[in-house]
Image (cartoon, rainbow, N blue to C red):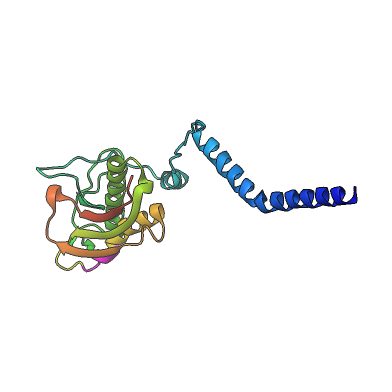
Amino acid sequence: DVHIEKRALLSLSSHVITMIALRPLFSRQTASTASKLSSSLPKRASVVIHARDVHIEKRIEELKIELPTAPLPKANYNIVCMSGDTLYVSGHLPITADGTLLTGTLGPDNGGMTVEEGYAAARHCGLNIISTLKKQLGDLDRVEQVVKVFGIVSSHRDFKHQHLVMDGCSDVIMEVFDKPIGYHARSAIGVNTLPLNAPVEVEAIIKIKPE
């Protein structure tokens, strides 16, 4: 009887050792089976809602800035031209929110417009550019960088403050887009006349985010 019990005990111990040794294998097989079953189950459909950010347009509203209607070309050219991620904006004139085109020449010493009047005209040019961007892009938050602004000021020969006039455009761009997006390179020159007797004309280069 003692020998039988000993053999039974040894047999039981052998089974226990085998089970312990095989446990990791069973665990891996179980995990593999569960993974296969999970992958074979139908996936639950997920709905992704893309919310459009309106940071820039909200800022315009908060600043109580009224954008004019986006202007149309005055001759045979496109108001903008896109190349890759760069938008080239044609020259914009100072058209007010009610559609009035400001006219004149800078140079108070010669009976022309003052720096302050020129500044206001350049600001209107900037607002018209912003209005065009909104119309063309559909979302002002797509503006990644205002790269460069080029200002042309109709000036009497003795007028030397074209750079101060152009601050009107630069300031409104900075108000709307802020740093770093609105902080741009700039040139300002004086000429003896501009189309339609406009005192200022401004063009711009804008880098655009992908849709």
Instruction: Give the residue drawn at x 59%, y 48%.
Output: 28
Q: Which percent across, then down, holds residue 165? A: 28, 61
Q: Which percent across, then down, holds residue 177? A: 39, 54
For residue 118, above or below residue 159: above
Judging depth in this view, the residue of 78 and 200 nearest the camera is: 78
Judging depth in this view, the residue of 10 and 140 nearest the camera is: 10
Q: Please indicate whether residue 172 sits to the left or right of residue 49 in the image.
A: left
Residue 126 highlighted magenta (yes or no): no
Q: Is residue 100 visible?
A: yes
For residue 43, above or below residue 179: above
Q: Which percent across, then down, holds residue 140? A: 36, 46
Q: Which percent across, then down, holds residue 74? A: 14, 42
Magenta stretch, main secondary structure class: helix
Q: Please indicate whether residue 39 sits to the left or right of residue 8 in the image.
A: left
Tell how many labels: 0
**Which residue is the extreme one toward the left?**
76
Judging depth in this view, the residue of 150 and 9 nearest the camera is: 9
Instruction: Give the residue drawn at x 10%, y 43%.
Output: 75
The quadrant the C terminus occupies is top left
Residue 163 highlighted magenta (yes or no): yes
In which quarter of the view is residue 191 placed? Answer: bottom left
Q: Which residues are magenta?
A: 160-164
Q: Is residue 115 visible?
A: no
Judging depth in this view, the residue of 9 and 144 nearest the camera is: 9
Q: Please indicate whether residue 32 sits to the left or right of residue 156 in the image.
A: right
In which quarter of the view is residue 68 placed? Answer: top left
